[in-house]
Amino acid sequence: MKVFIGADHQGYDLKDELKRYLKSSGYDVEDDGDEKLNPSDDFPVFAARVAKDILVSGDKDSKGILICGSGQGMCMTANRFKGIRACMGYDTESIRSARNDDDSNILCLPAKFLSQDKANIFVETFLNTEFAKAPRFKRRIDQMDELT
């Protein structure tokens, strides 16, 4: 599974730690930036990179992780792209539901409110929860896609 990861300055440190953790766990990780800490960078740049990379990868198993201060800006930006279903990660149950029920393909994390250990747990939950593929879930995803 390919994992695209991106963060602004507020999520930079957490991104680098998550990248190391994921690589050591055997994931194929592509860092979509920022490449170095830049206090004046803007989150939409990195959200767009990750979203576009997932869409052009052609691999339905590709996933993304986006990190900023609250996670909200990244989530709003990523969800502007047709075919992207970004979710916020505040607890394992909501993350599990986003994957199982909604086939979320990007997890957005709030760097201001997460420890590294908690972020690792959230990412593992996201990456290891399969989409249930129930007809009602597929129907709802199709309805979402028709909106964009």
Image (tube, helix red, strand yellow):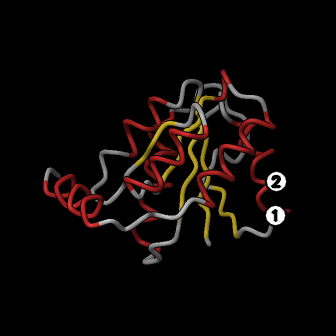
Left or right side of 2 for 79 = left
Left or right side of 47 for 19 = right
Q: On the rendered image, what quadrant is the N terminus found in?
A: bottom right
Among the 4 quarters of the image, the one containing residue 132: bottom left
Q: Which residue is drawn at the image coordinates 45% and 42% (left, top)?
A: 87
Tell me, for residue 21, which label it has, or none: 2
Left or right side of 100 for 3 = right
Q: Which residue is drawn at the image coordinates 59% and 52% (left, top)?
A: 126
Q: Badge 2: how crowded within 10 Å, few (<14), some, or many (20+)?
A: some
Tell me, for residue 117, which label it has, or none: none
Please state which of residues 101 and 21 is positioned toward the viewer in this rendering: 101
Give the residue at mark 1. 25
Q: Which residue is drawn at the image coordinates 57% and 31% (left, top)?
A: 90
Please state which of residues 98 and 13 is positioned toward the viewer in this rendering: 98
Kind of residue sitting beneath label 2: Tyr
Instruction: Name the element at disc 1.
Output: loop
The residue at the far bottom in this view is 58
Instruction: Name the element at disc 2.
Output: helix
Kind of residue sitting beneath label 1: Ser
Residue 37: percent from the left, percent from the top? 72, 35
